[in-house]
């Protein structure tokens, strides 16, 4: 055993002192490095606080703006309809929600100001295919004649066009009332369907006949909301039409075993429709 005054004890004390000094230096090194890093972050923040100069898109020549619009329209198919389908089906698995919350691509170019709407919207509307599940909100957003303060001319073309993408999984109890009403109000507006091979040609042709129905009574009842609901149910190949109580025939009040009398469909101009069958309901509100 070494005594405190022995050389061995002195050596051990010196070694312990060196270890403490080295440990202290090792602790100070990360602190100094951290301080340098923090100072760099402060410098970056100071630089980033410089005011950003807005890009004046409308100052570009018309040819360049049109090129940007063309690129935006060409890229839109990447978003419609795939993302909308994924969003709705994901929501439907988690709940019974029927709507979709997918953002509409290039919203800024269609709503930024009057000039952008005038230059871009018509190109964009003619190039997109809207999934049936998004048509209700799409019509309310883009295809409306609501008067906007400060807008010198309407932003809606009643003789425009709309392409709708059909997929059977989107057509279970699908409400198309707004679409039917839109076509009745603007008969020159062209609505066409694109679809997957899962559809037979006559299925789609019947839907086109439904939308293009120009029978006077049908048009009057749709416009005045006597026909308050038009639903599709692809599983049953059925079109459900709900009438206001005042105009509903007695047989339409049956909830089971309903038989549509011969000739009734012709009174509404629906007799050309062969593939889909019709069920009628009554709106008592």
Image (cartoon, rainbow, N blue to C red):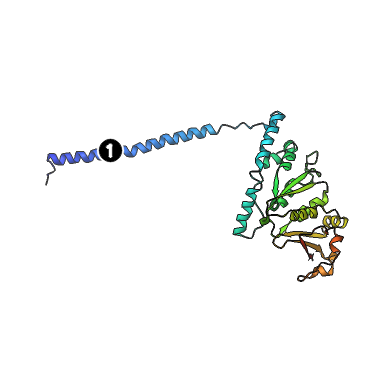
Q: Of residues 76 and 62, which is closer to you in this image?
A: 76
x 67%, y 40%: residue:
108
Q: Of residues 199 and 60, which is closer to you in this image?
A: 199
Image quarter hosting the C terminus = bottom right
Q: Is residue 93 left or right of residue 214?
A: left
Q: Position of residue 162 (x, y in %)?
A: 75, 46
Q: Is residue 15 left or right of residue 164?
A: left
> Which quadrant of the view contains residue 125?
top right
Furthest-top residue in view?
Answer: 61
Q: Of residues 58 and 68, which is closer to you in this image?
A: 68
Mark 1 residue element: helix
Q: Position of residue 211 (x, y in %)?
A: 79, 53
x 70%, y 48%: residue:
130
Q: Position of residue 171 (x, y in %)?
A: 69, 57
Indicate whether 71 appears above or below 284.
above
Q: How many marks?
A: 1
Q: Give the residue at mark 1.
A: 22
Q: Is residue 63 left or right of residue 219?
A: left
Q: Position of residue 207 (x, y in %)?
A: 76, 54
Circle 1: is it few (<14), some (14-19), or many (20+) Cα within 10 Å?
A: few
């Amino acid at each position: 055993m070494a005594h405190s005054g022995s050389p061995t004890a002195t050596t051990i004390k010196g070694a312990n002192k060196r270890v403490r000094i080295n440990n202290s230096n090792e602790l100070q090194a990360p602190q100094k490095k951290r301080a340098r890093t923090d100072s760099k972050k402060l410098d970056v923040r100071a630089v980033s606080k410089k005011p950003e100069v807005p890009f004046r898109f409308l100052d570009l020549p018309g040819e360049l703006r049109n090129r940007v619009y063309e690129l935006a329209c060409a890229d839109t198919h990447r978003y419609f309809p795939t993302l909308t389908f994924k969003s709705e089906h994901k929501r439907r698995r988690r709940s019974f929600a029927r709507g979709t919350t997918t953002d509409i691509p290039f919203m800024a170019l269609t709503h930024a100001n009057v000039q952008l709407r005038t230059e871009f919207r018509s190109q964009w509307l003619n190039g997109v295919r809207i999934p049936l599940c998004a048509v209700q909100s799409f019509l309310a957003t883009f295809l409306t004649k609501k008067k906007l303060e400060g807008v010198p001319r309407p932003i809606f073309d009643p003789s425009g066009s709309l392409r709708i993408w059909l997929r059977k999984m989107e057509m279970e109890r699908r409400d198309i009332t707004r679409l039917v009403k839109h076509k009745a109000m603007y008969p020159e507006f062209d609505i066409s369907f694109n679809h997957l091979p899962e559809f037979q040609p006559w299925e789609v042709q019947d839907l086109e006949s439904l939308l293009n129905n120009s029978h006077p009574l049908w048009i009057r009842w749709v416009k005045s909301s006597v026909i308050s609901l038009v639903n599709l149910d692809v599983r049953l190949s059925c079109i459900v039409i709900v009438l206001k109580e005042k105009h509903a025939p007695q047989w339409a009040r049956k909830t089971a075993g309903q038989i549509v009398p011969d000739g009734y469909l012709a009174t509404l101009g629906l007799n050309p429709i062969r593939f889909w069958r019709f069920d009628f309901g009554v709106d008592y509100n």
